[in-house]
Image: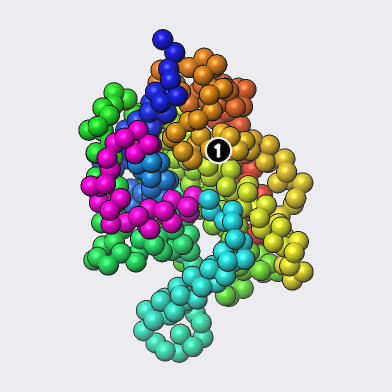
Amino acid sequence: MPQSLFEISKNLLMQDIETIYTLIKQSSQKDARIFIMSVLPYLTACVAGTIDFMEEHQVDCSALTIKRNYPHVLTKTRNKIKIYRERTNKNMTEIDTIRDGQNEEFANMLRFPILKQLGLNYDLGTYRLGGQIIGNTFLYKWFFDEIEKIQTENPQLEYGKTLGEAVAFTRKIWHTNYSIKGDFDFGTIEHTDYNITLRASKVFASSLDKGQCLFLFNIMCQVNFALYYMDRILSAENSLSIRIKYLTYYFSCSSIRALENYCSQNRTAKFPLDSSTMKNISCLLNEDFCNCMRHYEIRDRNILGATITHNDEMGALIAFYHGCSKTEFIDKLNDHLEAISNHIKKSIMA
């Protein structure tokens, strides 16, 4: 008997829930901290989508701590996966605010006032895996601004516990039988500090606006995380891995396009990337498929005409919206993510 839209949606949801449950079990590993920090906004989006889907189908989720105590955190952190797609001017201002705040925070750590007066404190920390920058302090500060407002001793830990509670609740309501493949090799993360106010730091090209550089640098870090770190942890064909990679790709392209529009309307801002290159990179954009990746409730009844195999609902969605196999799609997606990363690196890095 063919699957209903509910069954397709539920099966996709439960595959991701089982992956999140498996990742949470690994989170106690010391080396997992940077990975969990980077993936947390996506896990938040998945849990938020899970709660929406369950309530759509008459499952009472009102007792969940994350639903009861942290609705604003859930909403705003979930929106962070859009990166900088919307309100570019506000985002540029926020980048400056975060930078000013970190400057003050790091300057206050200096032992000698003369160093603070000279502005010699670090104001950007990067996290590297195998030579690739997969995260930075600005990006994490931006991601976690709402979580850090939680009035507890360790707000990130407390928030993480509420995500785990929601995952356990879902597994209890709708049992799973999925086997999650992955080596969970978190690798050795290298941390390097810079002071980007100094030309000698040689992080960004000196001729470019530092705010725009940080805007694009954050996007590059997210792309590198999805491209170079996810595959160390999960199988490339894992549905959550595909979901994270595609959302990163989609919103990176749309955020860069928003920056280009911002620069075209602001005579003092020069767009640092090549428009024709970005146009070629954007050829995998599909709004309907993106909506399937953002929400678990699939409403497009046309999908029912596709060949759908149980446990490979993701493959059916890919074939329906992109006309290729899952393996071909993953290869194309990885190629496009790599192209974005390389183009940003070539354009803004010293």
Q: Is residue 235 left or right of residue 33?
A: right
Dot 1: few (<14), some (14–19), or many (≥20) neighbours within 10 Å?
A: some
Amino acid type shown at disc 1: Cys
Dominant secondary structure (helix, strand or loop) of the stretch shown in magenta: helix
Pick out the residue farthest to the top: 1
Q: Is residue 34 visible?
A: no
Q: Is residue 217 left or right of residue 22?
A: right
| Residue 267, percent from left and from top | 77, 69
For image coordinates 48% across by 54% down, the residue present is 80
Q: Which residue is mark 1?
A: 290
Instruction: Compare residues 53 and 290 and report the one nearer the observer.
Output: 53
| Residue 245, percent from left and from top | 51, 39
Q: Which residues are magenta?
A: 53-81
Instruction: Compare residues 190 and 30 and report the one nearer the observer.
Output: 30
| Residue 224, percent from left and from top | 52, 47
For image coordinates 43% across by 17% down, the residue present is 3
The C terminus lies in quadrant: bottom right
